[in-house]
Image (tube, rainbow, N blue to C red):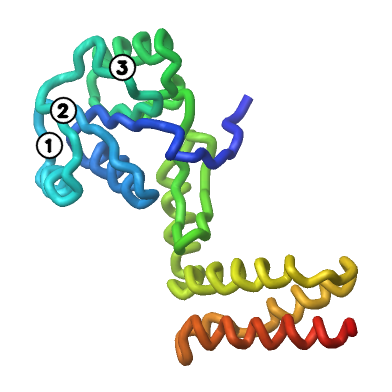
Amino acid sequence: MGYFPIFIDLNKFKALVIGGGEVATRKVLNLLEFDHKPKVIAPEFAPELEAIIAQFNLDCVRRKYQKGDLAGYNLIFVATDDKEVDTLIKKEADKIGAIVNFADKPELCDFIVPSFIKRGDLVISISTQGKVPFLSRYFREILEKKVPKGMKDYVEISAYFRSKLKELAVPKKLKDEIIEEFLSVKWIEIIEDDGIEYAKLLVNHLIDYYANKQR
């Protein structure tokens, strides 16, 4: 059986990263990108991770993992390169019901973390089911070049349009027509040239046009 793609609400989880090297640093950065501050445990921290811990005032413990460290945490990321420690962590996690991701050890993982592209609320995930991580990264790099930075604003204006459209009582066929018209507009260029507020004004005009058309 394979891994089922899913997004989780980090507000309902408490994350712990065990490890202080490059991989652990990447895990911490990924969590911070989604506004979640993990605790970090490791005997030593890479310079970049030291800087991140200081910048975001992260809780950290400067020693090896010890039994009981998982208490109070339910989302665990492990990057230790220590088989014995990994085994102990897995046993404790299973006992308390925490879910664990082990770097480069999919056979031990309860979940895997895909490569992803994030543009505001738009998140595109790429996975090879944990079998070929470098291939996931390769496809991510290809897609990153094709997904413009302005996509963050496109998602924002689309969410605004959707909220206005929900207020408009029209048949589904007409609603689909309005959505098609919205999608035909080059919103990213409009926002880059004139700003998001002007784009919202155009959305209002579009909705008003169809509202008046119904009368």
The residue drawn where x is 24% and y is 25% is 81
Q: Residue 61 versus residue 172: which sits nearer the camera?
A: 172
Q: Are circles 2 and 3 on residues that touch, CB within 8 Å?
A: no
Secondary structure state at the residue bearing disc 1 = loop
Which residue was labeled with disc 3?
A: 71
The image quadrant of residue 66 is: top left
The image quadrant of residue 95 is: top left
User: Which dot, 3 or 1, sits closer to the camera?
Assistant: 3
- Label 3 neighbourhood size at 10 Å, few (<14), some (14-19), many (20+)? few
Q: Residue 82 versus residue 33: which sits nearer the camera?
A: 33
Q: Position of residue 160 (x, y in %)?
A: 60, 71
Which residue was labeled with disc 1?
A: 45
From mark 3 to mark 1, how far is it between C-alphas?
22 Å
Which residue was labeled with disc 2?
A: 42
Q: In this view, does 96 lie above or below 133?
A: above
Q: Are circles 3 and 1 on residues that touch, CB within 8 Å?
A: no
Lower sequence index among marks 2 and 3 = 2
For residue 169, say whether it is visible. yes
Q: Are circles 1 and 2 on residues that touch, CB within 8 Å?
A: yes
Q: In this view, does 23 lie to the left or right of 182?
A: left
**Callout 1 amino acid:** Phe
Q: Position of residue 16 (x, y in %)?
A: 30, 29
Q: Where is residue 180 in the image (x, y as percent from the top left)?
A: 76, 76
**Callout 2 amino acid:** Ala
Secondary structure state at the residue bearing disc 3 = loop
The residue drawn where x is 50% and y is 62% is 143
Q: Residue 157 versus residue 77: which sits nearer the camera?
A: 157
The residue drawn where x is 64% and y is 82% is 203
Q: In this view, does 82 lie above or below 15?
A: above
Quadrant for the C terminus in the image: bottom right
For residue 142, say whether it is visible. no
Q: Where is residue 161 in the image (x, y as percent from the top left)?
A: 65, 73
